[in-house]
Each structure stands twice: as structure tokens, then as C-alpha cells.
Image (tube, helix red, strand yellow):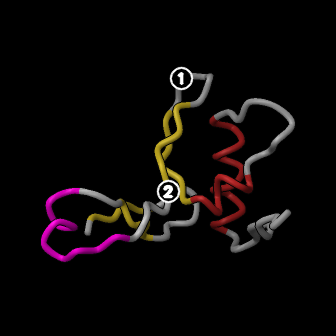
Amino acid sequence: MATEPCEVCGTKVRIAGGIGDLWSFAFESTQGMTLELTDGSEFFLCFDCMERLPGDGEPTAEDVEHLQALAAKEDLPPVDDD
């Protein structure tokens, strides 16, 4: 099982697939992904942090940096479970 930290909250996120899963028979899904934003930036985020990005337009590096600042202050907004 491979993991990578979320670039916003720092949570170690499971990355499914790979040779490690072949031998352990782990069938869990991936818990995050790398986002390629329209401004050319890339960030690996967990699904919860992706949900925290603004939905009123295309997210930018500024939006991710804002979430990083909130995470540093431990003031991340809750994930909307609609």
C-alpha cells in the first residue's frame, strides 16, 4: 500500500494499486488524487480537501493556498455532505 500526504491537511492518503496491493489483496480505493488546475499548478489532495475547494468556478493555486493557511490554523471548514 502506497501513501502520499495531502498538500492541504497533511493526512496520509492511500493510493490504490501497485505491486504492494497484489500481495496483500487489499481492495480499498484511492483516497485522493493529483489535481491539475487551470493556472498550471498541481496539488495532491485528499477527497475531503477537494470538497472544500470553492465550487463557483475553476479552483486555482490561491484557493489551495487559502486552504493550507486554514489547515495551519486548524480552522478548516467542514466538508459539505450534500
Let me know if residue 59 is in the magenta part. Answer: no
Q: Which mark is residue 32?
A: 2
Q: Is residue 59 left or right of residue 8?
A: right
Gap between marks 1 and 2, in whole Å? 19 Å
Where in the figure is residue 68, as x and y percent of width and height? 63, 56
The magenta segment is: 18-27
Disc nearest the viewer among 1 and 2: 2
The N terminus is located in which quarter?
bottom left
- Which residue is painted at 65% across and 52% down in the image? 50
Find residue 80 and report its image quarter: bottom right
Q: Magenta region, mostly helix, strand or loop?
A: helix
What is the count of numbered marks?
A: 2
Count residues near mark 2 (Cα–Cα under 10 Å), then give few for <14, some for 14-19, many for 20+.
Answer: many
For mark 1, what is the residue?
40
- Amino acid on which disc 2 is placed: Gly
- Which residue is painted at 48% across and 49% down in the image? 33
Where in the figure is residue 13, as x and y percent of width and height? 43, 66
Whether 48 is drawn above or below 38: the answer is: below
Count residues near mark 1 (Cα–Cα under 10 Å), then give few for <14, some for 14-19, many for 20+.
Answer: few
Q: Secondary structure at mark 2?
A: strand
Where in the figure is residue 39, as x and y percent of width and height? 61, 22
- Which residue is painted at 49% across and 63% down in the image? 31
